[in-house]
Image (tube, helix red, strand yellow):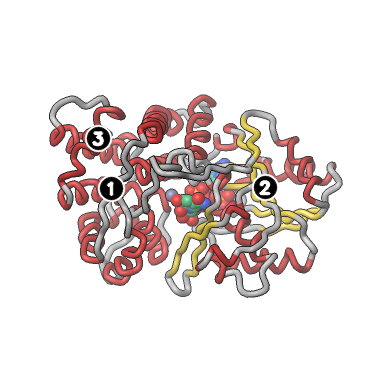
């Protein structure tokens, strides 16, 4: 196990009826920028409840609404402008990962003189940020408890992740009932996303980090158990609660501290979203089994690790080679049959391969130091097989 630093300054209020804790925002000042998406929180009534609590707490509210899935740099810039014009003290995101990510870069951009895109390209330029708070409405990204934010500039077909400890939320409210209204598509995509975060951490080359591996297996089993229940019974509290907490733990440092490895499915998916604006979790589900098959073929020495995944998560028996292959088949079956997700790139509207070379060239850097490092040609082959 490697040395590591584990620090999560985010206070979590988990469960029903936690929204009153928004009164604690007073500790960061009196002027809030409320950031939200395309209207799901208005439909659910969460918007009204949030504004009421903020106003009753004596906080003045400025709004940035309409943040897109795969949030755009233009929204970030608008948020930064609002912060400056209204001397905003803190940023509150109410929504899914896109809204929280946008809020994080707005919070950093408000304390930066240049253009916020600089901060997306280089997180080390984030030297200060307004305090970030969140109310999570979609279990998926873990943005509610991590240092990351992913922002797109569609005019350049670019989507990059940035990171800074300064944008980790001060406090996040996780009420599973707020996810009851999440659609089947987004429930499946969110489950695939948290599973992918876990896979990226699980398939590591660091030896002896047994606990981290077992924690990964627990998160994966939780997703496999509760994803289908949430899909078919959206108001099942137990399912929504387990998924919500799994999503946070998958990426908050608990699973990879001491077992670090570069992620490589995510950089490939970010290229798909950057060029075709697809749903992140769907892209990951399509790529994951293809990637698993590819790495096993490229580096057969990884068979034992893939087999251990099959045994410990799926209860598969038999020799390493059989268990590894079956584990991948089970993964594909879970995404595409049980969760009803699109099976290939054509199914999400990617009908030509024009950009695969360019996308692979951009994703290649991300896979250095990954479980099985991939070349540009490898990535093109993975895109082709996923097509
Ligand atoms: O915009 P609204 O109207 O709120 O609707 C959203 C959106 O259309 C809807 N939604 C959210 N909560 C809902 C709801 N609909 C009904 N009821 C609710 N309670 O769901 C749609 C998708 O929302 P979005 O926030 O885009 O989804 P998600 O949370 O999956 O976030 C995806 C973004 O996060 C990035 C992805 O790349 C993508 O841009 N990621 C962020 C990470 C991080 N910060 O650590 C890591 C991830 O790997 C990921 O890359
Ligand atoms: Zn993800």
When the figure is inspected, residue 360 is found, relative to residue 301, above or below; the finding is below
Front-most of 14 and 207?
Answer: 207
Instruction: Name the residue located 13 percent from the left edge and 30 percent from the top edge.
Output: 319
Mark 3, Cα crowd under 10 Å, few <14 / some 14-19 / many 20+, is some
Element assignment for label 2: strand
Is there a contact, CB below 8 Å, between mark 3 and mark 2? no
Is there a contact, CB below 8 Å, between mark 2 and mark 1? no
Instruction: Name the residue located 37 percent from the left edge and 36 percent from the top edge.
Output: 209
As measured in the structure, the alpha-carbon distance from the residue carrying label 3 to the one carrying label 1 is: 14 Å
Front-most of 82 and 28?
Answer: 28
Q: Select label 2 or label 1 by which is in front.
A: 2
Q: Select label 3 or label 2 by which is in front.
A: 2
Q: Select label 3 or label 1 by which is in front.
A: 3
Q: Pointer 2: what residue?
A: 133
As measured in the structure, the alpha-carbon distance from the residue carrying label 3 to the one carrying label 2 is: 38 Å
When the figure is inspected, residue 312 is found, relative to residue 275, above or below; the finding is above
Q: Quadrant of residue 334?
A: top left
Q: Pointer 3: what residue?
A: 330
Quadrant holding the N terminus: top left
Q: Position of residue 200 (x, y in %)?
A: 36, 46
Q: Position of residue 102 (x, y in %)?
A: 59, 58
Element assignment for label 1: loop
**Of callouts 3 and 1, which one flags the residue occurring earlier in the amino acid sequence?**
3
Q: Pointer 1: what residue?
A: 343
Q: Can residue 228 be seen by looking at this rendering?
A: no
Considering every residue shown, the one lying at the far front of the view is 3
Instruction: Name the residue located 17 percent from the left edge and 38 percent from the top edge.
Output: 325
Mark 2, Cα crowd under 10 Å, few <14 / some 14-19 / many 20+, is many
**Of callouts 3 and 2, which one flags the residue occurring earlier in the amino acid sequence?**
2
């Amino acid at each position: 196990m490697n040395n590591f630093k584990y620090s999560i300054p985010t206070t979590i209020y988990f469960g029903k009826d936690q929204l009153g804790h928004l009164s604690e925002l007073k500790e960061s000042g009196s002027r809030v920028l409320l950031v939200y998406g395309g209207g799901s929180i208005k439909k659910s009534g969460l918007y009204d409840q949030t504004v009421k609590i903020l106003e009753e707490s004596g906080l003045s509210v400025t709004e940035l609404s309409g943040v897109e899935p795969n949030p755009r740099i233009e929204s970030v810039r608008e948020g930064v402008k609002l912060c400056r014009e209204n001397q905003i003290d803190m940023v509150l995101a109410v929504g899914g990962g896109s809204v929280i990510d946008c809020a994080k870069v707005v919070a950093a951009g408000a304390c930066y003189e240049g253009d916020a895109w600089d901060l997306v390209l280089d997180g080390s330029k984030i030297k200060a940020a307004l305090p970030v708070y969140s109310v999570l409405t979609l279990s998926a990204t873990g943005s509610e408890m991590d240092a990351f934010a992913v922002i797109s500039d569609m005019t350049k077909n670019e989507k990059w992740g940035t990171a800074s400890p300064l944008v980790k939320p001060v406090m996040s409210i996780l009420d599973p009932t707020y996810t009851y209204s999440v659609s089947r598509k987004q429930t499946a995509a969110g489950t695939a996303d948290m599973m992918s975060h876990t896979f990226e951490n699980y398939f590591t080359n660091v030896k002896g980090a047994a606990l981290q591996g077992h924690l990964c297996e627990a998160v994966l089993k939780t997703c496999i158990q509760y994803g289908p229940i949430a899909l078919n019974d959206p108001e099942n509290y137990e399912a929504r609660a387990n998924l919500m907490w799994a999503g946070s733990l998958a990426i908050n440092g608990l699973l990879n501290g001491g077992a670090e490895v570069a992620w490589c499915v995510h950089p490939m998916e970010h290229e798909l979203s950057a060029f075709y604006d697809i749903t992140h979790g769907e892209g990951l589900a399509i790529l994951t089994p293809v990637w698993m098959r590819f790495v096993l073929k490229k580096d057969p020495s990884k068979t034992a690790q893939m087999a251990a995944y099959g045994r410990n998560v799926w209860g598969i028996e038999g020799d390493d080679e059989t268990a590894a292959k079956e584990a991948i088949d089970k993964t594909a079956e879970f995404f595409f049959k049980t969760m009803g997700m699109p099976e290939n790139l054509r199914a999400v509207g990617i009908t030509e391969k024009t950009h695969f070379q360019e996308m692979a060239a951009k994703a290649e850097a991300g896979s250095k130091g990954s479980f099985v490092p991939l070349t540009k040609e490898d990535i093109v082959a993975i895109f082709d097989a996923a097509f």
